[in-house]
Image (tube, helix red, strand yellow):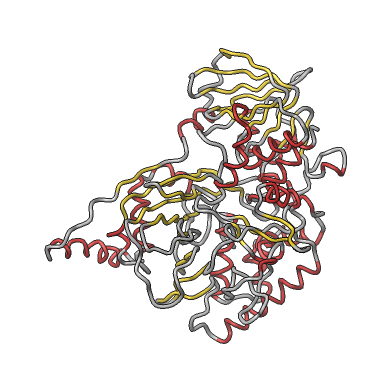
Amino acid sequence: MQRRDFLGVAGAAGALALAGCEVPPPIEGGFTGIDVARGHAMRDGALKSQAPATVKRTRVVIAGGGVAGLAAARALRLAGIEDFTLLELEDSAGGNARGGMVNGIACPLGAHYLPVPGDDAREVQDLLEELGLRQRVAGRWEYDERTLCHSPQERLFFRGEWQDGLLPMHGVAVDTLAQYRKFAQRIDALQHAAHFAIPTLKVAVTPELLALDAIAFSRWLDSEGFSDVQLRWYLDYCCRDDYGAGIEQVSAWAGIHYFASRHGFHAPGDPSGSANDANPEPNLENSGVLTWPEGNGWLTKQLAAPLGERLRTGQVVTRIAELRGGVEVDAWDAASKSLVRWQAERCIVALPVFIAARVVENAPEVLKHAAAHVRYAPWLVANVHLRGPLADRVGAAPSWDNVIYGTRGLGYVDARHQTLDPTPRGTVLSWYRPLGPSSYDTADGRKLLLERPWTGWRDDLLAELSVPHPELPSLATRIEITRYGHAMSIPRPGLLAEIGSQRTAPDDAHRGSVIAGRLSFAHADWSGYSIFEEAFTRGHVAGASLA
């Protein structure tokens, strides 16, 4: 949207005033969800000089309460190990998969869905069975329909109207459709030639995969003759959605893995099409999506609930040291403003590798190597409360996921889409904005994220979403923004070769564990990219390895 168009939207409020109509009150809002100062105090070393005020003992310390740390805690409980403590920096566990509330409506603060897991993700399947979301009926696996994303699932605002699915279709050229079909055929061939799977630790890193890992996805597309503008926009959107960076920055392995590890890519007209292309009625086995009003925050809340006092929030881990008879973990308690020293037999380090490398004394080479190669994409999630429903537009019906072609953001999801109440009313829209390197963003995204006032992001959101919804600024009452400076690791060219084979567990039973002495490392960073299945499986394996 051009500046003049946004000024036209803003001017509508002035026109209402001149006409004697009621002008909506200003939009309230601000930053929420992440305590930036707390994290930076650890980074700057301001807390390390303190002497411990208290010494406590436990059998296992888990450092980090994101998905991996919560999965490790569950694995310990399943193994009968109840004597453990989980230390989490923020005031609630869940990491990038937490939920929140805006004006009484639940909404995600980060990840907002979980694809129906395939058989390689057995650990995730087991979790869903435990939570009652997956069960075998008459010999077939069925998922709780209340949590499967309701139809319509996705739509794209393209060339002035909404269309079903996210692959651009309205008025595209014959050559574009031909490239869609060619890309589908190429992905199908690669699926059969090499084993792409989620989680990645279940797959051998073969020479074929390393060859794809060595080059950028854009370079591979060039070599294969995929030059169509609409196809490349869609592929770039997919990479920014899953990896936080565009097709020029992620590896060809990552770009292909997005499709080949799950639902493939289905050209228009293919009856087995998925929710990620032009087919609005996906095949559940290939592309079903589980979601909740608060996104994956529902899952992390279930994982945290049984922990009780073993989950300690507001804890800034400043030091992890392996000693002759155990480990010491120092954590600054935000509530008491004092340093607590934990002594334990083992420590599961469920922290991003760049943080782990800072706090682990005499960091092992495997950790230093990983930290030297992983780069992160900043990310922003803005939840905007609307006092009333948006007006219907020409084209596809309002959907759960709504994307606007050619914009910096990734569109929005509607927090009320899963409700069974059909009454039109106010809602919360969750707008996602990656700030990793791409054709849209070449500046220092992390610096911009930290220095720009919330009103700047407010204006970006209103300008972008006003393209299909010119009435949105007059309906918005509050915008709450969550910032992630290191939201997700970017699978850049060469990263799979550098860390993808870092599996140092002593036996096949715990394949995928990264173990150094009394320290077990568990985080999605060890997979090279950040999704629920990777984090959960690595956390589960790390916890199970201590049984």
Work out which quarter of the rendered image holds the N terminus and state it: bottom left
Residue 153 at what x, y percent from top left? 53, 67
Residue 14 at what x, y percent from top left? 17, 61
Q: Is residue 88 above or below residue 382?
A: above
Residue 356 occupies quadrant = top right
Residue 270 at what x, y percent from top left? 66, 80
Q: Is residue 95 above or below residue 114?
A: above
Residue at 76% across / 68% down in the picture? 191
Residue 258 occupies quadrant = bottom right
Residue that extends furthest to the right in the rendered view of this protein: 507
Q: Is residue 294 left or right of residue 67?
A: left
Residue 437 at what x, y percent from top left? 53, 55
Of residues 65 and 241, the one nearer the viewer is: 65
Q: Is residue 155 above or below residue 65?
A: below
Of residues 382 and 396, the one nearer the viewer is: 396
Residue at 74% across / 26% down in the picture? 346
Residue at 71% across / 25% down in the picture? 83
Q: Is residue 281 left or right of residue 6?
A: right
Of residues 310 and 228, the one nearer the viewer is: 310
Residue that extends furthest to the front in the rendered view of this protein: 138
How many numbered marks does the figure carry? 0
